[in-house]
Image (tube, rainbow, N blue to C red):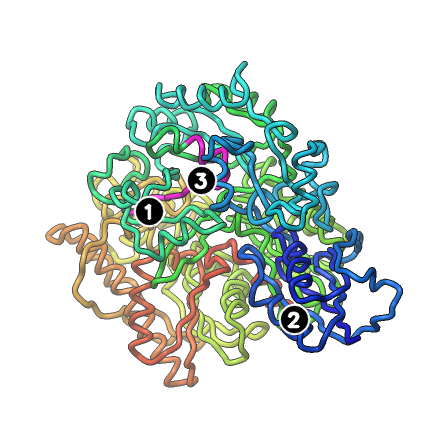
Amino acid sequence: MPARRIEIGGVVQGVGFRPFVYRLARELGLRGWVRNGAGIVEILAAGSEVALAEFAEALIAQAPGAAQPVLLANMEANVEAPDCGAEDFSILDSVGAGAAMRGLPPDLAPCDDCLRELADPADRRYRYPFINCTQCGPRYSLIHALPYDRANTAMAGFAMCAGCATEYADPGNRRFHAEPVACPDCGPRCWFGEAGGEAALGACVTALRAGKIVAVKGVGGYHLFCDAGSETGVRELRRRKRRPDKPLAVLFPDVAALLAECVDLDAAGLAVLRGVERPILLAPRRAGAGLADSIAPGLGDIGVMLADSPLHHLLVEDFGRPLVATSANRSGAPMLIDPAKAERELVGIADAFLHHDRPIARAVDDSVLRVIDGAPRVMRGGRGMSPVELRLPFTLAEPVLAVGGQMKSTIALGFEDRVVISPHLGDLDNPEACAAFARMAADLQGLYGVRARVILSDAHPGYASTQWARRQGCEVVPVWHHYAHASAVAGEFGGDAPMLVFTWDGVGLGPDGALWGGEVLLGRPGAWQAVARLRRMRLQGGDVVAREPWRSGAALCWHAGMAAPEGLLPPGGMALAAWVAGVNCHESSAAGRLFDGAAALLGLCKTASYEGQGPALLEACAGAGEPVPGLPLRVDAAGVLEADWGPLVPMLLDESLSVALRAARFHGALAATAREISRAMRDVHGVEIVGLAGGVFQNRLLAETVLGMLRADGLSVRLGRQIPCNDAGLSFGQMIEFGARK
């Protein structure tokens, strides 16, 4: 009898793939077995040639919705082999512990079937906050090791009751081999003060309706909840958390009419919100939405999310209105996951706590997406979307760890022909964040069963990630910041053709020792050359420049020979004197500082309370603007094309023009400059592909204007979708750059 050995990779563990294979094989009359291997699913199937062919095709085409299967092998097998099993088809015990793992599943939002049971008074899991099945529930946040079996998860301490054990063992049941399966009789429980179970949920909702701020333990950590319609409540949350301006996410009941009242969403946006990843989606806010103005001061978009767990679903549906849902950690600190620590750390912030006793193996923050040019783009990868596992266009000789930069930190682990990118870790500005970074580096390597021999770091010696890398006793290979940005977009889209990449961001050390951020690179991974840049400006102050946009605004004026507008500078004249004398000054081409300066000159943001505040306000206030020319271009002594932003300064200071018009003209001028540089490079170098990389292209207005202009010129333009264009994409870009060099 013909037989096949089949290996399936991708996301196939924790998503009901083995039960699916089992049922499919029995339907087709095949015998053999299926089992979890080291992050893959291994299958031995025997039967007719026709049935085997249909089986192999259906494994991919008919896979469960949460699975992402990839066929790794399909080879002939000996049907008489001792391990072929009985005359029927069965699920064998998992194997492969200690090998390099594959396909770690992310956390999945509650599926429709579980939500129906959750709402059914006749169901034994009615209103049970931890309901799940093979198609939904926690995964990455509770896995200790692969293969993905209950004993290797945070659910190991919960013994299944007879009812759950029966479902778990029944091939016809939706919970057949669902590892986190549980019910009110045997699973995790929640509590609110002295109240437990259903009473805890009711007490939490009552507290929220009374205007309280409640810390709620979710899938990947604690969030702070309060009434999103209460201006008083939201302002109080900001005061207690010392977060005066940074936008707050809003958790909505899944009611289409309510969403339509508050935000501008098309069908594609609604599909993103309702997807199994349940990200935060930045969406345009509607006027008169009934939400507190202080949710996102001065911004046109708000972060919208739907419930990512049954617990959150019950809370927001019972509350009946939108809730603020922001990470319950002090600014810059990692997510909180332990009840006792949460109560200690959140004294003076949270009025009350809704805890549960399902352990969290690793903290995971929310994912954040923004629709740009009609496609959802990842701004921050986290719960539901991490870890990201991708194929590399090369095979690594030994495992490699890429540790990214200083801001929006992520870590990438490369081995064989794969790379795994961690969830968002945040900015490495304090010891707690650095400790969480070190834990993630160890966790990734331990979870996937590989030990890095080479560490890739940013070339900047002052970054905490670079300093950590140098303490590990491994070979450390530095990668230039903007080369990594360019390689990230090149690596995501693939291909060997040369690209022109605009690497516009806040700041990064360049190969010439200058602080880059407005460079345009030509080439391919492993061979980049700066061919254009924004004119460099002299800035007074060190890292404080990024937090004080007035310094960039003043520098723009002083370079142009103009006085800074009244009220921009601190009193005393010391800032100008230090700038003229070059005291504590540096030069930078950074586009981010140009945006900061424009925001300051328009009176939008003199001092920023969060990273990127000035540029965000500048984008939000921009109105419709007529087409404007690009900035003047000249070739410098090194042959680099330089764009002079000087003409923007008098326009930004022209109070006869509205702030909205000036902001629009600023964006239009930069977009037109990108078009002119692209045209020049196509004429000289024949470039047909352009990439947009760096945090500046999180700006939807700028990105869509540039995309439209370049496409109108017949160019192919690429902006990251799965890999963030901001510094969260650096670790992946470092891996691509390193591999290309090799």
Circle 2 crowding by C-alpha within 10 Å: few under 14, some 14–19, many from 20: some
Residue 565 lies left or right of residue 366; in this view the side is left
Figure disc tally: 3
Q: CA distance from mark 2 to mark 3?
A: 36 Å
Q: CA distance from mark 1 to mark 3?
A: 31 Å
Query: Which span of residues is magenta-colored?
Result: 300-315
Q: Residue at x 59, y 57 (%)?
A: 458
- Expressed as whole percent of the image width and height from the top left, the position of residue 675 reads 32, 73
Contact between labelled residues 2 and 1, with CB atoms less than 8 Å apart: no
Q: Residue at x 31, y 51 (%)?
A: 597
User: Is residue 308 part of the magenta span, yes or no?
Assistant: yes
Contact between labelled residues 3 and 1, with CB atoms less than 8 Å apart: no
- Expressed as whole percent of the image width and height from the top left, the position of residue 409 reads 55, 49
> Would you name the residue on which mark 2 appears?
56
Q: Earlier in the sequence, mark 1 or mark 2?
A: 2
Checking the image for residue 307, the label placed there is 3
208 lies above or below 478:
above
Q: Earlier in the sequence, mark 1 or mark 3?
A: 3
Q: Amino acid at mark 1?
A: Gly
Q: CA distance from mark 1 to mark 2?
A: 54 Å
Secondary structure beneath dot 1 equals helix
Res. 198 in view: yes
Residue 120 lies left or right of residue 250; in this view the side is right
83 lies above or below 280:
below
Q: Earlier in the sequence, mark 2 or mark 3?
A: 2
Residue 295 lies left or right of residue 1; in this view the side is left
